[in-house]
Image: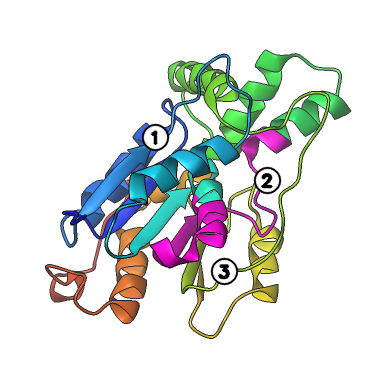
Amino acid sequence: MSDPFDVLWLSASPVLQRFDKPLLEYLSKYTSVAQWEYQQTKDEASSIDQAVELLYEFLKWRDRPVHLAGHAMGGAIALTFARRFPQKVRSLTLLAVAAQPANNWQAHYYFQRQLFNISRELVLASSVRSLFGNQPPHTTKKLVAALDKDLEQSPSSHSLFKLVYLPKAGVSMPMMVCGSKSDPVVNPPALHDWSNWLKPEDKLWECSQGYHFFHYFYPQQVGEQILSFWHHHHPHLLVASPLSFSTSTSYS
């Protein structure tokens, strides 16, 4: 099986994948990037195992390993897949994935619901501020609706009754872990917990700001770091080098 892509980006949230778009558009300028989407049906059990099995079916006949990447739940799926099928993965890039992979925004949501006697709507509004920063009222309303849908559509196993945990460990292939210093979900201590499993060839990088969706707010800054990591381990991956262009960027 010969494929026209070298990088596979995993998405597990139909409603939140829009925030991956700026980074994917930047990366696609320099290498071939494909996007794999997992959509959970209403009658399907909440588990990432089904997503991992479907991903294996997709990559089963591929004749060379792929650079696997993903944000949050997409990254957790990528991590689980890389541990189960290491021969299929050339490198692993995780964005906003804690060393405890189940430590996602939904875990924080359900923890607040368990701890405080406040409504779903109020916790979601608080989550918007935590994940995206202060936003205008109309934007906050749209983001609340998006998070509400993600609670129903994501393969996360968290619920009001129980918070689940996934194994903490590293992987055999080169790995890059990216986070944000202003992310309240995968905060710096949760991110730096990866240091217990990093190999010499691995990389941990933090964006100075951008909250949980830092790759949406700073796609070029994040993209340059990821491209540098891929290029180091696969020099022939890039069709053009971002280093040949000006790296000064204005963010608004």
Q: Earlier in the sequence, mark 3 or mark 1?
A: 1
In the displayed structure, 148 sits above or below 7; it is above
Task: Point out which mark residue 171 bears.
Answer: 3
Q: Nearer the viewer, residue 10 or 123?
A: 10
Q: Position of residue 203 (x, y in %)?
A: 49, 75
Query: Mark 1: which amino acid?
Result: Gln
**Badge 3: residue crowd in 10 Å (few <14, some 14–19, many ≥20):** some
For residue 83: magenta?
yes
C-alpha span from label 2 to label 1: 19 Å
Task: Tell me the residue at 41%/27% (across/down).
Answer: 14
Q: Determine the residue positioned at 56% across, 49% down.
A: 76
Rendered view: 37 above or below 5: above
Describe residue 167's horizontal placement relative to residue 49 as left or right. right
Span of residues in magenta:
78-107
Q: Which mark is residue 102?
A: 2
Tell me if residue 209 comes above or below residue 111 in the rendering. Answer: below
Question: Where residue 170 appears, x then y in whole percent?
Answer: 62, 68
Mark 3 residue type = Val
Colour pattern of the rendering: rainbow
Left or right of 249 on screen, residue 239: left
The percent coordinates of residue 131 (x first, y second) are 56, 38
Query: Which residue lies under the disc numbered 1?
Result: 17
